[in-house]
Amino acid sequence: MIFLHTSDWHLGLTIRGGMSYADDQKYVLNSIAEIAKENEADGILLSGDIFDKSIASPEAIHIYDDVMTNMCLEMGIPVYAVAGNHDGPERVSQLGSLLSKSGFFIAGALQREPRVVSAGDTDIYLLPWISTDKVRSVFPEKAEIINSLEDAYSVTLDYWRDSFTEGKKRILVAHAFIVNAETSVSDRAAEVGRAAMIGSHVFHGFDYVALGHLHGPQDVNEKIRYSGSPIPYSFGKEEKQEKSVTLIDTDTWEKKVIPLPQLHKRMTLKGTFEELMNAEYEDEVLDAYVRLEVLDTFVGMDSVAAFRERYRNLLEISGKDVEREDARITMTVGELEEKDTDPEAVFMRYCEDMLEEEPKKHLRDLFKEALKDYEKEVETR
């Protein structure tokens, strides 16, 4: 059998400043559906973080509804999914029995008995995101020995292994943070609290473990893999990753990685102000989600406006720090524009641009007095 492994869609995620990823997400999820169809996949393994927030936005739910209807009903490809730490477990698993009849199998909150779906000669186990408290409540007789998240996984999976059917192949769909796996900037939850890491040994006994949670596609070992997010959601490491899905052949356990096309690339461009303004980039670059590193000048409002005329999806700008010649400061375009609605912030930015230093306190006080006088004058007109 052939299964397609994907994860970390983060439907509803917005770029700082409110710009939506909706068009990018619809584009790449349609590509995933087409890849599954072209490769005659027998099922899709969706390893959590379907949504970016536990209470999903109407836009995110609309995308979710369309893609699941397309995959399960129109294409007839079953989807085996688990809730991740960003998902609302009770919400995503509502109407579970009814959805199963349409070929959509999902595990929300952890249950004592394994959520296992038989697909031909393969049993697919669905393990949602868990916590130590949740596992203690589900296995109260083991509460005293659950002192870490790794203990929680061991208790749960040791119990589930008792249900293994001899002669059956076994896939586990899960959402977890494995020790020594590589993170990206957008792995927000993973980067906070290293106590959430677990050893890969807890998954012994499974022929393939389809993991979600980390956004960089990577093998933990020959049996355990992160498919990664389908879209690069941050700069740095992630913009250099080739986003993909993984096809697993259960006859040979061979893995095939298939790159995903992107509606917008994500890239960092470096150069002087003049170089960045005049470089002969193709439309693919000018239309990308861009972070600019300006090497020769301070980044001010005028330069931001000029760059935005050229780079249609400019997200971040890095320039010299006015306080230290050898340091740099990075801000999102949204942060810059937010500051521009505050007269004092505009004055501070002007002094940094023109005087190349922050205004002293007495100068700031003079500006505040002048601003008050101006506001009074406006009120009396």
Image: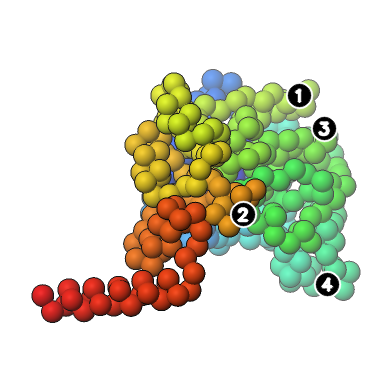
Q: Quadrant of residue 282?
A: top left
| SS for dot 4 | helix
Q: Are marks 2 and 3 in contact (CB under 8 Å)?
A: no
Q: Which residue is mark 3?
A: 222
Above or below, comparing residue 285 to residue 148 in the picture: above
Amino acid type assigned to the residue bearing label 2 in the image: Arg
Q: Closer to the N terminus: mark 1 or mark 4? A: 4
Q: Quadrant of residue 5?
A: top right
Q: Which residue is mark 4?
A: 143
Is 37 on the left-hand or right-hand side of 193? left
Above or below, comparing residue 282 to residue 152 in the picture: above
Q: Residue furthest left?
A: 381
Calculate the distance from the C-alpha at mark 1 to the C-alpha at mark 4: 39 Å
Depth-wise, is mark 2 or mark 3 nearer the camera?
A: 2
Depth-wise, is mark 1 or mark 2 nearer the camera?
A: 2
| SS for dot 1 | strand
Q: Do we see residue 268 in this rendering?
A: yes
Amino acid type assigned to the residue bearing label 4 in the image: Ala
Calculate the distance from the C-alpha at mark 1 to the C-alpha at mark 2: 53 Å
Amino acid type assigned to the residue bearing label 3 in the image: Glu
Q: Closer to the N terminus: mark 4 or mark 3? A: 4
Calculate the distance from the C-alpha at mark 2 to the C-alpha at mark 3: 48 Å
Q: Which residue is mark 2?
A: 324
> Residue 337's spot in the image, x, y percent?
38, 55
Calculate the distance from the C-alpha at mark 3 to the C-alpha at mark 1: 9 Å
Residue at horizontal 65 percent and vertical 48 percent from the top:
326
Q: Are marks 4 and 3 in contact (CB under 8 Å)?
A: no
How many residues crowd mark 3 within 10 Å: few (<14), some (14–19), many (20+)? few
Residue at horizontal 70 percent and vertical 55 percent from the top:
191
Q: Quadrant of the C terminus?
A: bottom left
